Image: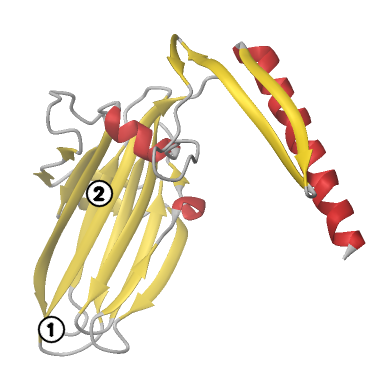
Amino acid sequence: MRDRKNQGALFALCFVVLLCAIGWQQGVQIIGPTTSDGNVSVTLNGTISGGDEVPLSVDSSTNSLQVIDYSHHEIHSASHYNRKNWLDITGAGTTVDFLIVTPDTTKWAHLVYEFAGEAEFTLTAYEATTTSADGTPLSTFNNQRNSANTAGVTLYSGPTVTDVGDEIWATKIGSSRNDTEGSRNDDEWVLKQNTKYLLRVVKVATGTHWFAYNLEWYEHTDKN
């Protein structure tokens, strides 16, 4: 038990050191730490600066510090976009191609995805694809519906592919009904600028079955 308390105290000390470093950089006043019954308490006062200074805020019910992850922040900043749709695909061996084109800018796309199929499909992604025609443009949408910002990334269906490029990812879905393949934030792809990416969907099963896809990304210029 004493070892656990010592570990907890050490963790708390490390946390306070981190807060002090943040506070020194951001102008946050740190009061404490104080201890009671083996618990460590630290009080933060002030603002965090990110261009404009904003006050530290806590949830009124739980007193927890109010934070959101970065991709959620990009939604609020009107730099987060999506394309979500489905289609019926008929016949074993039928191929459906989607093309993702990134602009020649350092405002890079940070992409996550989700796919679902009623039957069996193979999915393969290629980088540095070459096309003679990009295909039919697909609409993309800003998650911040009060913004007029538009995506720098463009999406197409049915491109004329002359060279698929380099395979960077492959999987299979649909071995059981309504199977899903998805990504989390730690599976995010930061797409290369001025590059074409091919997503090739090939139907394995016979008959007609639906295939659904969801592509989400935010566009961000690195700070460093």
Q: Which residue is mark 1?
A: 91
Tell me the CA gap for discs 1 and 2.
22 Å
Which residue lies at the image location 80% right of the left edge and 37% below the top edge?
14
State whether residue 194 appears in this view.
Answer: no
Q: Position of residue 128 (x, y in %)?
A: 40, 44
Query: In the picture, which quadrant includes the N terminus?
Result: bottom right
Tell me: residue 194, above or below residue 61.
Answer: above
Residue 169 visible at all: yes
Say which element carries label 2.
strand
Q: Which residue is mark 2?
A: 99
Report which quarter residue 15 is drawn in. Answer: top right
- In the image, 213: left or right of 106? left
* Image side of residue 53 versus residue 160, left or right: right
Q: 10 Å neighbourhood of mark 2: few (<14), some, or many (≥20)? A: many
**Location of residue 58 with respect to 212 vertically, above or below:** above
Q: Position of residue 23 (x, y in %)?
A: 66, 18
In the picture, which quadrant includes the C terminus? top right
Label at residue 106: none
Write the residue at 46% across / 49% down.
188
**Relative depth, front residue between 10 and 170:** 10
- Residue 17's place in the image compared with 158, above or below, is above
Q: Nearer the viewer, residue 9 or 214?
A: 9
Amino acid type, label 1: Gly
Q: Secondary structure at mark 1?
A: loop
Q: Residue at x 45, y 33 (%)?
A: 58
Residue 214: name its quadrant. bottom left
Task: Please state which of residues 128 and 2 is positioned toward the viewer in this rendering.
Answer: 2
Judge by depth and name the residue closer to the eye, 65 or 187.
65
